[in-house]
Structures are given as C-alpha cells and as structure tokens.
Image (cartoon, rainbow, N blue to C red):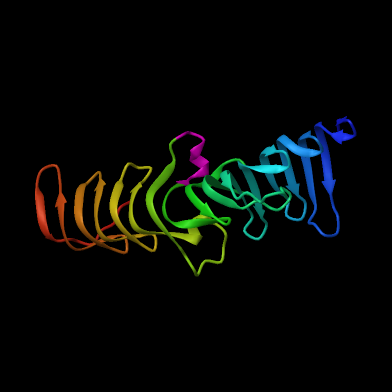
Amino acid sequence: GHWINCQRSGRGIHINESMNKKGIRYEGEWCCDLYHGFGRIVYTETSDVFTGEFKYGKRFFRGKLEEFHSTDKIKCVYEGEFTDHGDDPEVHPKKNGYGVAQCYGVEDGVNPTHRFSGHFKDGERLDGAGKMEYIDSLIEIEGNAVHVYEGEFERNKSATTVVDHDMYHRVGKGSMTWKNGDTYTGDWAANQMAGKGCLKNVDGVYTGAFAADKYSGRGELQYSIKTTTGAAGKSEPE
C-alpha cells in the first residue's frame, strides 16, 4: 500500500494472523498508520465481512456486516449501528442500535428470504417492536411478494436455528398484511392470531375473538350485504 513518512497512509491491505488474535484482512484507507476512511475487514476464521467507515483506528458506529452460518446454510446481511469497541476495530463487531437485517440462502445469495427492521443489543435482536417482511424469493423479482408484519416480537427460547422467523415469534400487538391483500390487526401468540383482533379479506370484515389463527368465540362478521353477530364459525384467512 501507500506510505508517507514511514507511516501507512492512503489505500492499502493489512493481514493480521498473529497468535494472540483471530485472523483478519483489512482492505481500505489509512492515515498516520491507522485505519482511517472507508474500509473492509474480513474475519478469516468465520469469513464474516464488515464494511464501513473508520476514524483514526476506530470503527465508526455505522456499517454493514455480512455473517455466514454454515450449519443453517444462510447468509445474514445487517446494515445499521454497532457497538464501539474502542481502540481495537479488529474485534468482531456486535450489532447494537437500530438496523436492518436480511437473510439469504447461501446457494442463492441474491434474493432474501426475510428482512427485519428494528433494534439490536450485543449482537442480538431485542424483544419488542419491529418490522418483518417475509419474502417469496421466486416472486419478489416481480416486485410485490411479501407478507409484512409490524408489531411486537418475543424470542423463541426453544429455537435451535439462527433463522430469524424461527427464533422470534409474533407475540403481543401487531398488524399483518398478506400479499393477497388480507390484513389483520390485533393480538398474537406464538406466530398465530390469538385474542382480540380484526381480520379484513375478500369475504368481509371480522372483529372479535381468535385462537390458533381461526375465528373462535364471540365476534362480528360484516359482509357487503348484511351483518351477523354471535358465536363465530371456525375459519381462517388464506
């Protein structure tokens, strides 16, 4: 790379494979022998990649992190805020603050399977409010092929996979819009409509009780011609 007064300055490549640190490869800009400007770090042990800004040896708090999970055969790409690790930007960054995470099948690597927007702490998603877009990658290319949920989430403690829609369930208050235009706003439990809510679809509008994604209990079903009130029949959205 470039040197000025015996110090690395300008663009260059640095490889660190010392015994007391996990290997990294830095490609980017330097100033006064420090990472400074736009750069990219590859963590050789995991093949994870951080891309972003550096300021006099410190990683800037925003950037992009690509993580590879070989067991689940997915790649997750996060763009957002990170923890400041002080003087050592070679420490693997942790997602910390607001960001957007997308997951891809490793074999595909082009079309995401889902996209989450929300808050993170110490590298993990936080329980609470967020937005999840569940994507049909085969149709996404044509533009409008996502189920979108905005509301509350809770970590699924029994999950054994890193795939977000398995690790975090829709729990609490939230709204879902399906790609066919159906919408539901209300209570959720374990990824299912459960409690009180309002479902709108081509048949009409149902407001009332739900259990396990079905009408259950008392509610009101409105059609374009008439309205019926009473015990709801067992049904579920498409």
List x then y, in percent, for residue 132: 44, 48
User: Which quadrant would the N terminus be assigned to in this image?
Assistant: top right
Q: Residue at x 10, y 43 (%)?
A: 225
The image quadrant that residue 190 belongs to is bottom left
Tell me if residue 17 is in the magenta stretch.
no
Q: Vertically, is 215 above or below 104?
A: below
Image side of residue 184 versus residue 39, left or right: left
x, y percentage for residue 44? 77, 51
- Give the extent of the magenta segment: 134-143
Q: Is residue 62 above or below residue 206?
A: above
Residue located 62% across and 58% down the image: 72
Please tell me which residue is depicted at 56% across the width and 45% down the height of the picture: 81
In-image side of 53 versus 143 (left or right): right
Residue 109 can be seen in this image: no
Q: In the figure, is residue 109 to the left or right of 97?
A: right
Asked whether, in this view, residue 92 is left or right of residue 219, the answer is: right
Query: Looking at this rendering, what residue extends furthest in the bottom direction?
Result: 158
Most foreground residue, 146 or 88: 88
Numbered label tally: 0
Q: Is residue 66 visible?
A: yes
Residue sitting at x 22%, y 46%: 203
Q: Position of residue 144 (x, y in %)?
A: 43, 36
**Of the pair 210 and 225, the residue shown nearer to us:** 210
- Residue 183 location in percent, x, y? 30, 46
